[in-house]
Structures are given as structure tokens and as C-alpha cells.
Image (spheres, coloured by chain):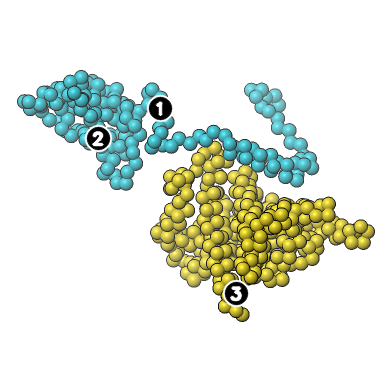
Chain colours: A yellow, B cyan
Amino acid sequence: MELALIIEKFILVVVIFAVSLGVAAYSTLAERKIAAFLQGRVGPHRAGPGGMFQPLADGGKMFFKEEIIPAESNPFLFIMGPSLALLTACIGSAVIPWGQSMQFGDRVVELQVTDINVGILYIFGVVSLGVYGIMIGGWASNNKFSLMGAIRAASQNISYEIAMGLSLIALLMVSGTLSLKDIVEQQHGFWNNGWFTWNVFTQPLGFLLFIVCSFAECNRTPFDLPESENELVAGYHTEYSGFKLGAFLFAEYVNMFVSSAVMATLYWGGYNYPGMDYVFELLGPTWAPIVGIAVLFAKIFFFIFFFMWIRWTIPRFRYDQLMNLGWKVLIPLAIANIILTGIWITIKDNLL
Amino acid sequence: MESLSNRKKVLEQKPMNFWERIYLPSIFKGLAITFRHMFVKKETIFYPEQTRPVSENWRGLHSLKRDENGRERCTACGLCALACPAEAITMTAAERQKGEENLYREEKYAAVYEINMLRCIFCGLCEEACPKEAIYLDGPIVAADYLRKDFIYGKDKLVEAPLKS
């Protein structure tokens, strides 16, 4: 392996890591601002112009607060929980293609850390690992509320992962590949052969199921039962304080960023946008991918906004409603979607 | 049975139809409502810079008044302390010396006058009890502080600023 490749990947990893942490940090501000706007308030606005430095203030506060490890807890696992949650949240972004290949002189740079051919499976693995942090943290706290939250998180994630996987299978049947790069390349442009190229237009039901499941996977309202504050104090992070609490909360926002990116990549065409070939000719192979990156980020930010918008609109489900929705509605719908997709592919391949 | 007040409303519980059961239309309706609220007028009052208008009979921080010549009206009779249901007021009386006629209106005045703002319930009974119209609860909201001792307000904080001229 040549040195230039290592340097290139290293820079890319650092940039993606910094961007996802930065986006997550500013998501906390955005969450509070959007909550305020939706409720007819102004939101945090004292720290810097328009509250720009609020995330720094919050982060600083988290660092300087007293860290308590309860005497009855398991200290190793107690620290392990939030670390694992933050770690698994951060490594999910490795397989997401952030843009088209960029050309610097005669060197082509792939804007993706690694293009493994089982990219979606990797994301699934990482996402299902994410619940480990919550479970370990909740269990190690040795607190009934935390344990309840952890159990809820575990059972909820297991239930919704099935529906999520099934909804993706229909997408994989259409695309015929597990590699995220290939899936995005198939959605090139916006319009081709009399139909939209983006997967959301061929798999609308699949996308609906996927977005509902990703709300559940991120533990966001209306599925935030693991930390439902009016039932379980604060759920799995009841006993946490200081930066370990910050890590848990931060992991939630990083997860939100990554799942928004996955949704944009799988269903909304990733970095593709209408008229991209024209822009590519106009700007050349060095600068055109930048537009693609901006488009991808616009989509990601829209989804993050959507997450927050939903959060401040819909109240939390009851636990039996959550399980009913997962097992009795989403999974049958996902299976029906697979069957319909199969029929459609058969007709398209053989008759049209 | 006949309802006595005739105000009872019988709630009709119909089974939900298909669109209500799939829940999505109501979600979109709710999303539209919250989205509309992004553009309504913000209700926020930026407190230290702006203050909410208060009513005419608002009772806030006490002030010890001066008369038209800038002399303190309080004569340390103690009626306010007696009237106070929370026992928040204490005072020490002192006799006016010669040459202090421009400072105190009566021959007796309060050398120390303290109100414990943590005890005070802002009922305004001291204001009603005062025979000299010396105390009024016409100030702002009592500010927050860190220590209990800082809530005992002495004459330095209570007495009106001296007249200018």
C-alpha cells in the first residue's frame, strides 16, 4: 500500500470524524432552537450571535460537572457503557459515500473511507452494536429505572431491526448490491428512462418503513421509551453525570446524523441531484463533487430537521403500542413490500 | 337516570376508520400545525432588557420613602413589623440628634431597618400598617442570589435615592 493512500484515508477519516462530531454538537443547538421555534419561543440566544457558542458552553459544562460513579454499580461496565455508545455511533459513517470521486491533478480520491461490498450489513452490525452501550450502561448502574430503560432499549431495537432489515431487502432486490457506493451510483441524476432514479420513488413503502424503524433505532420520539423521563426518571442514563452523560446524549445525535446519512444515501439519491452531469461538465472533476457533497449534506440536514420536527410534534407511544406497531404492522408490511417488489421485478424483467 | 345539571355530555366512541387507524394522516396534520408555529410571532420576553408590564396593584421590592424635602419618613414605630405575618421585618430605633433634621422627618428614626426577603411573602400589610406612608412595595422583582445572608436587605437597599437638587 502506498503512503499517499494511507495519508489520504487518514485525512478523510479525521475530516469525517470531525464533521460528524461537529454536526452532532450543533444538532444539540438545533434541537433546542427548533423546539423553541415550534413552540413560539426564541431558544438559546445569549452565547454568541444567535446562540452560536451554546454547544461549547454545554460541552464545557459537561466536562466540569462532578462525575459520580455509584457505589453499588459495576465501575468498569459503568464507564464502558457510554464509551461503547459513542464509539459505535462514530464508526457507522465509514462506509457512507460522501461524494463522487474527486480528481486532484492525476490523482483520483474516493470520498468514502472504505467501499466494502457488504456496506449495508456493516451499518446494520454497527447499529445493532449501538444498543450494547445503552444496555451495559443501564445494567451497570444497578438502578431499577436504568435497568427498565436498558431492557426497553434492547427489546425495542431487536423488534425494529427486523422490520428495518426486511424493508431493506426490498431495496436490495431492486439494486442487486450491498455496496453503498454502487447503490448511490445507480441513483445517478434524477430522471432516467421515464421514471425517477432515486430509490424512494421505486420503494416508497420501503422508505416509510425504514424511516419509522430508524426513529426507533435512534431512540428518538415517538420511540424514546428507553429514556422516557416521565416514567423512568431518565431511563438508562439516570445514574450518569458529567461527561459520561454527555457521551450518551452525544451518541444519540451522532446516531441521528449517521442514520440521516444512510437514509439520504439509500433512498434519496445520496450526492446525486438533478442536472449533475451538466454541473460536472461545467466545473470539472475537481470542483463538481463539492456540489454533490453540499447536496448530500442538505439532504442529511433535512432529515435531522425532520427527526426534530417529529420529536416536537408526536407524543411518545405506550410500550404495548410500540410492540404492536413493530411486530403486527411494520413486519407484515415489510414482507408485503418484498413480495410486491418481487412480483414487480419479475414482470419488469420478463414482460416489459 | 336523569342528569341533575343537564351539563353531562355523552361521549360517542366510534370505532376508528381505516385512515384514522393507520395514523399517518393525523401525523401529517400535526406536522403541518407545528410547522406553522415556526412562523408565528415569538412570545419570548428578553427579561433583563425587557420587562413584562405589571398591574397597578403589583407588589414588588419594598422601598422606604422620603418626604418632599428628602427626609426619611420612617419613624421606627414598628407597626410594619407587627403587621408582618411572616415576621420578616426587624428594626432598631434611634433618636434624632441635633443637626440631623434634614435627614429624618420625625424625632425618632430607624437606625437599622432590615427585611428578610426569603421570609417576606409580599402581602403588603406593612404598607397598610404604616401611619407615615413610609413603606411601599413598588419596586421590581427581588433578584436571585447565592447566600441566605444576602437576602436580608438593609437600609442601603431599601431607602429611596436622595432627592436631587
In three-dimensional space, the C-alpha distance between marks 3 and 1, rounded to whole angstroms, equals 68 Å
Q: Amino acid at mark 2?
A: Lys
Q: Are marks 3 and 1 on the same chain?
A: no
Q: Residue at x 72, y 61 (%)?
A: A184
Chain letter belonging to callout 3: A
Q: Quadrant of residue A293?
A: bottom right
Which residue position holds label 1? B54
Name the residue located 15 percent from the left edge and 32 percent from the top edge: B111
Q: CA distance from mark 3 to mark 2?
A: 71 Å
**Number of other residues with Cα within 10 Å of mark 2, as a class: few under 14, some 14 to 19, many 20 or more:** some
Residue A89: image location, x then y, percent: 58, 63
Classify mark 1: helix, strand or loop: loop
Residue A269, x across and y down, in percent:
71, 56
Question: In the depicted view, which residue is nearer to us: A112 or A169?
Answer: A112
Alpha carbon separation for disc pair 1 and 2:
22 Å
Tag 1: amino acid: Val
Residue that appears at 55% across and 68% down: A11
Q: Residues within 10 Å of mark 3 (few under 14, many from 20)?
A: few
Foreground pick, B161 / A144: B161
> Of helix, strand and loop, which one carries label 2?
helix
Quadrant where the N terminus of chain A lies?
A: bottom right
In the displayed structure, would residue A181 be above or below residue B109?
below
Badge 1: how crowded within 10 Å, few (<14), some, or many (20+)?
few
Q: Which residue is mark 2?
A: B157
Pointer 3 residue: A5
